[in-house]
């Protein structure tokens, strides 16, 4: 089964970091936007595999993102 999880990518002083609101504790970093995105993809797969191995229900994706003009 395939699912799309929202990730939030943030620029830090030295690199990029990312997390998924639907998967607490699932994070990644990378030197570039592309690298952190790829690492986050891997992190999500590992995180979900670990949850399943531990008998934890994997939450369905539920977060959405919107831009608000200010």
Image: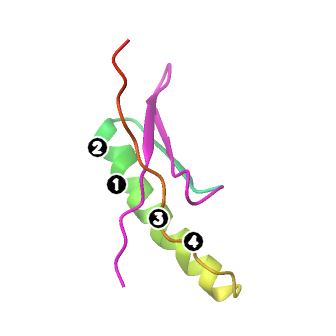
Q: Is residue 26 magenta?
A: no
> Looking at the image, is mark 2 or mark 4 earlier in the sequence?
2
Q: Which residue is mark 4?
A: 59
The residue at which mark 2 appears reads as 34
Given contact means CB atoms under 8 Å apart, are the residues at marks 4 and 3 in contact? yes
Which residue does the numbered mark 1 point to in the structure image? 38
In the image, 51: left or right of 48?
Answer: right
> What's the residue at 37%, 72% (across, down)?
3
Nearer mark to the viewer, of 3 and 2: 3
| Contact, mark 1 vs mark 2 (Cβ under 8 Å) | yes
Callout in the foreground (3, 1): 3
SS state under label 2: helix
Q: Nearer the viewer, residue 54 or 34?
A: 54
What residue is disc 3 on? 61
Alpha-carbon span between mark 3 and mark 2:
22 Å
Secondary element at tag 1: helix
Tell me the residue at 49%/24% (across/down).
Answer: 12
Q: Picture coordinates of residue 66 (x, y %)?
A: 36, 36
Q: Is residue 9 above or below residue 27?
A: above
Which region shows up in magenta? 1-24
Real-space CA distance between mark 3 and mark 1, rounded to the nearest whole angstrom: 19 Å
């Amino acid at each position: 089964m395939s699912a799309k999880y929202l990730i939030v990518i943030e620029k830090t002083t030295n690199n990029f970091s990312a997390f998924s609101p639907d998967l607490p504790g699932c994070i990644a970093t990378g030197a570039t936007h592309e690298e952190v995105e790829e690492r986050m993809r891997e992190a999500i797969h590992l995180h979900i595999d670990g949850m399943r191995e531990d008998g934890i229900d994997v939450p369905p994706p539920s977060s959405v993102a919107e831009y608000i003009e200010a």
